[in-house]
Amino acid sequence: MSEIQKRPSLQEVLPKSGLVVSEKGGLSELLCKPKLLPLKSITLQKLEEMEAQVAALNQQQQAANRAQTGAAKFASQ
């Protein structure tokens, strides 16, 4: 005997009253909306802001040093 014939057959039982719910069919892939990711992370943005602040401070210090050296040269003449 084959495997299928050895198994006892199951008889379907349907309720005499109430709703019969069938979940056959209608199953398909459900696609979600794509998640938008930031182009730059918050950490990278903070680092870039810090670098810009340091560069601006460096430029201010260099300008102040040039003004002092220019004033010293003018005073010595």
Image (tube, rainbow, N blue to C red):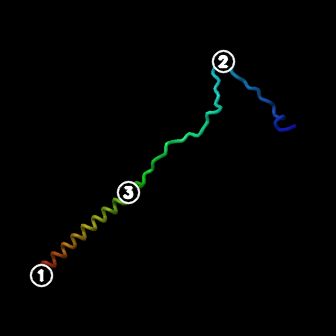
Packing grade of label 2 (10 A; few <14, some 14-19, many >=20) is: few
Q: Is residue 52 left or right of residue 15?
A: left
Residue 8 is labelled as none
Where 66 sits versus 53, above or below?
below
Q: State the SS at label 2.
A: loop
The first of marks 3 and 1 along the sequence is 3
Q: Position of residue 56 (x, y in %)?
A: 28, 64
Residue occupying image coordinates x 49% and y 42%: 33
The mark total stands at 3
Q: Which residue is mark 2?
A: 17
Q: Quadrant of residue 62?
A: bottom left
Q: Position of residue 46 (x, y in %)?
A: 37, 57
Q: Earlier in the sequence, mark 2 or mark 3?
A: 2
Residue 11 vs residue 33: left or right?
A: right
Q: Which amino acid type corresponds to the residue marked 1 in the rendered image? A: Gln
In the image, is 75 to the left or to the right of 6?
left
Q: Which residue is mark 3?
A: 45
Q: List the single residue furthest toward the top.
A: 17
Residue 41's place in the image compared with 55, above or below, is above
> Which quadrant would residue 27 be assigned to in this image?
top right
**At label 2, which amino acid type do we have?**
Ser
Residue at which label 1 appears: 77
Within 10 Å of disc 3 (Cα), the crowding (few <14, some 14-19, many 20+) is few
User: What distance separates the C-alpha of mark 1 from that of mark 2?
Assistant: 113 Å
Rounded to the nearest angstrom, the CA distance separating label 3 from label 1 is 48 Å
